[in-house]
Amino acid sequence: MAAHRKSAHRKPKQRPFTGPAARTAATLALAGAATATSATGAGAAPAEPAPTAAQVRAKVDRLYHDAEVATEKYNGAKEKEAAATKAVDTLADEAARRTDRLNTARHALGSMATAQYRTGALDPAVQLALSSDPDSYLERAAHLDRAGDRQASLLSGIRRQLSGIARVKARADQETEALAARRAELNQHRTAIQTKLADARKLLATLTAAERAAYERSADAAHGGGPATSADRAAEGAHADRSAPRSSAAAPNSRAARAVSFAHGAIGKPYVWGATGPNAFDCSGLTQAAWKAAGVSLPRTTYTQINAGQRVSRSELAPGDLVFFYSGISHVGLYIGGGQMIHAPRPGAPVRIAPVDHMPFAGATRVA
């Protein structure tokens, strides 16, 4: 009995939590630990420091440069898109002309078949026997033989025309596919330009007014001064007649002088990507327009303009030469002598005179 009472008063053995109870306890413990960590701030990831004004300026410069690279790719894609559009239109016109000729031949063949049906109901031998004028009939029969030859010729011509139309339509389908690809490429480069310029504007908005002003001053200095510098205005004032050639004494020929004159007349006009004038320009649009005014047709992009003439060294530069910058040949200006050029720098910076040595020199080309 004593042993029984002792057993009855023994404390029950504790069992560890298992199942749902264990999971609930673990969750509460973790939540408590997380709360404690949050409350003390221990282990929290430090916030990234805001970029300095110098870092923002460097990134904005990179974005503007990347936008200019994308602009030249856009210009090239636009040129190809224009060529593809012209090819599609030309093939459509050709198909229409061939179809008109085919319809004319079909009409002639139909008229001939109708005439033969009307006269061919009787066997030719019977027609000869019944004819009151056999000689006249034989003459008509000879005409019918010649008509048959003409019919065979018409049929052969129709077959050739059908084959030709099929070939034209096949080429038109290929050009239409190429046009769609060019337009997709164009949209891709347009989006890239707009995105990079928007990103640049957002970054500039993070700077204070003083920092933005400092950035604009440094960017202007790198690209040849502020909007239409006093030297530029003085040069323009000295040449009220913008059609008159400028620097003609120093230019190697009259066409180069006219190109330089046009560039002087464009000073102060805004930079707009994809623009070729007359009211706005991008860099290669300005050089193309300047030489067009001199009667010379240049290709549209920087990386094709560099191959549009004879390469010259930096020491050989003469007014009218095209000067190129950066390893990717993404910028171009028109050399005007004295170590200076006229160029369209970037968005927000209009056409201006600038020293050639303010950007990484990549080469030069003499157009004429």
Image (cartoon, helix red, strand yellow):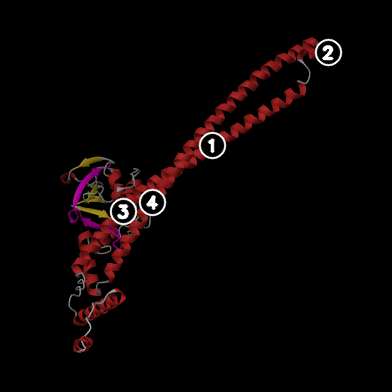
Q: Amino acid at mark 2?
A: Leu
Q: Earlier in the sequence, mark 4 or mark 2?
A: 2
According to the picture, the residue beneath numbered tag 1 turns out to be 95
**Badge 3 element:** helix
Disc 3/disc 2 C-alpha distance (Å): 86 Å
Name the quarter where the N terminus is drawn: bottom left
> In terms of sequence position, does the residue under pointer 3 or pointer 2 come before the other?
3
Camera-nearest label, 1 or 2: 2
**Which contiguous range is marked in magenta?**
344-367
| Horizontal side of residue 124 vs 9, given as left or right | right
Report crowding for label 1: few under 14, some 14 to 19, many 20 or more residues within 10 A (C-alpha).
some
Q: CA distance from mark 1 to mark 3?
A: 37 Å
Q: Toward which corner of the image does residue 114 lie, by quadrant?
A: top right
- On residue 186, the disc is 4
Q: Measure the alpha-carbon separation of dots 4 and 2.
A: 77 Å
Q: Position of residue 147 (x, y in %)?
A: 68, 19
Amino acid at the residue labelled 3: Ala
Residue identified by numbered label 2: 130
Count of marks placed on residues: 4
Which corner quadrant of the image does residue 237 belong to? Answer: bottom left
First in sequence: mark 4 vs mark 1: 1
Residue positioned 65% across, 22% down in the render? 151
Quarter of the picture containing the C terminus is top left
Among the two numbered marks 1 and 2 on one chain, the one whose residue lies closer to the N terminus: 1
Image height of 102 relative to 72, above or below = above
Is 107 in the magenta?
no
Residue indicated by mark 3: 70
Q: CA distance from mark 1 to mark 2?
A: 50 Å
Q: Nearer the viewer, residue 114 or 266?
A: 114
Task: Tell me which residue sits at (79%, 18%) in the image.
Answer: 122
**Mark 1 and mark 4 in contact (Cβ < 8 Å)?**
no
